[in-house]
Image (cartoon, rainbow, N blue to C red):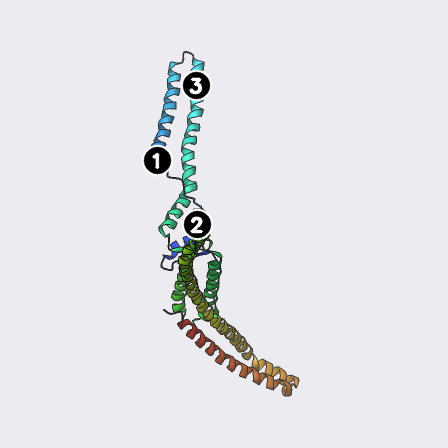
Amino acid sequence: MADVVVDPDVPEDDAQLITESEHLLIRMRRGWAPDPLPSRASGKAGRVALAAITLMVLSLLLSGPHTYRAGGLLLLSLIAIPVLLVIFLRKDLDEDEETAVDRETYEQLRWYEGRYVLAADLDESSRRLLARARRAVATVTHSAVNVEGLLDDVRNAVMLPAQEWEIARLLAKLSALRTKHRETMSEVNSPEVAAVAEPLARALDSSEEAVVARVEALERYAANVADAERAYRAHHQIEELRSRIHQYEELVSESGADGFAVPEITRLAEDADQLERALRRSVRSAHEAFRYLDP
């Protein structure tokens, strides 16, 4: 799971690019930016320099009094001009190839600034809360009861990413403000400033408590889904065993073990019915827990 949470309203392809660019986001947070595009003037200067060198070589060829000197200069020019072409042009091509992808990604990341949260931007307490929220969302999303449609999978697909994003967004704001508050208060010696800062600190704490309540609601929902998941899997295992009951009955009948095995097989059928009822109860409980997440 990437340590980037993206606003679910960001288009899917762009969201995937943001998620996969965590390393670039970290570099950007440290002040990295791609080099500016080379100006047309610099490229033109290279071409002018190359033309000047070519003219110089040709003038030497025409002014040389001796044939051997002209031949030597001609050979030198035939070698030097392609080499210079490679040096000037290849350098520009290499720079373009190396920076084009990073430059394009950088521009998109800047365009969506504020629409994603990087876990590295959060303070320690906020990172722990975000990790809890994301585990709860993953528990629900990847559960068989959700995949099989026993839960409201359509609403889950919309509501859970929205909840995860809202928690991440609030934690990012809380972390930034709390960090600034701590930096300011680390320099405070005045009781007057401490008195003013105290209610602000309580505001930060109450905001964190509100986010904790959101996370705990997600975790309760995930716990209910986990119960439904266990009942669902057990129900399927019991059903698989029930489908082979006639084979067991045939075996115990042929072996003369009827008196010992028949009560056990009967109990198997009863257990399957109980598990089916437990599954229905678990799914209902999960639905009730989900209602607390619905704004």
User: Residue 262: x percent and y percent?
Assistant: 60, 86
Which residue is pictured at 49% across the width and 57% down the height? Answer: 124
Q: Which residue is mark 2?
A: 25
Q: Which residue is mark 1?
A: 39
Q: Residue furthest top?
A: 65
User: Residue 174: x percent and y percent?
Assistant: 42, 58
Q: Which mark is residue 73?
A: 3
Q: Which mark is residue 112?
A: none
223 with respect to 157 (left or right) = right
| SS under mark 2 | helix
* Residue toward you, 196 or 165: 196
User: Residue 116: x percent and y percent?
Assistant: 40, 55
- Asked if residue 40 is positioned above or below residue 287 in the image, the reply reads above
The C terminus - image quarter? bottom left
Which residue is pictured at 41% across the width and 58% down the height? Answer: 195
Q: Are marks 1 and 2 in contact (CB under 8 Å)?
A: no
Residue at mark 3 to residue at mark 1: CA–CA distance: 34 Å
The label nearer to you, 1 versus 2, is 2
Going by the numbered disc 1, the residue's amino acid type is: Ser
| SS under mark 3 | helix
Tell me the quarter of the picture where residue 87 sits. Answer: top left
The label nearer to you, 3 versus 1, is 1
User: Residue 133: x percent and y percent?
Assistant: 46, 63
Going by the numbered disc 3, the residue's amino acid type is: Leu
